Amino acid sequence: MNLKEYFTKNEGTGVFSTSDGNGNVNSAIYARPHVIDERTVAFIMGKHKSYENILLNPHAHYLFTEDGNHYEGARLSLTKIKEVVDKGIIDDFRKARSAEIYNRYKDLDATLVYFSVNEIRPLIGDGKGVN
């Protein structure tokens, strides 16, 4: 699966799941990831529960359901690799998504968190042969 192509052409709903150091799980609605390359994605994360959990446990999961067909999508197993707090860089990512997104979130205190993509699976099924 070409991640950049997939997330450029498909609209839908994303759910980002994390857990804290004790295994307590949190899930939150998240936008499509910013695809850096085929094995790296980034999310702009506000200072909320998902971000707090990533500081304690670097592993996360992102589930994406395509609009119009709730049986098509992707599941990404992720591991945090780095963070960027530079507002200029974060603003550039927001502007690349859309002017509306930039204007809506430009004042939100956020961190750009990069993740390695460990595994890609379809929304339904075991995903054999998907990587």
Image (cartoon, rainbow, N blue to C red):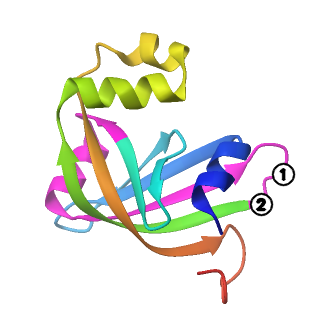
Q: Quadrant of the C terminus?
A: bottom right
Residue 121, how many percent across, how many down? Answer: 61, 74
The residue type indicated by label 1 comes to Asn
The answer for how far apart the CA atoms under marks 1 and 2 are is 6 Å
Which of the labelled discs sits on residue 72, or is there none?
A: 2
- Residue at the (22%, 34%) spot, across then down: 47
What is the residue that sits farthest to the bottom in this orientation?
128
Asked where in the image residue 59 lies, by quadrant, the reply is bottom left
Asked if 55 appears above or below 129 in the picture, the reply is above
Do tag 1 and tag 2 residues touch (Cβ < 8 Å)? Answer: yes
Residue 58 lies within the magenta run: yes
- Residue at the (63%, 43%) spot, across then down: 13
Left or right of 120: which side holds 108?
A: left
Which of the labelled discs sits on residue 80, or is there none?
A: none
Q: Circle 1 is placed at which residue position?
A: 69
Left or right of 21: which side holds 63?
A: right
Please give the range of residues in magenta: 44-72
Count residues near mark 1 (Cα–Cα under 10 Å), then give few for <14, some for 14-19, many for 20+: few
Asked where in the image residue 82 lies, by quadrant, the reply is bottom left
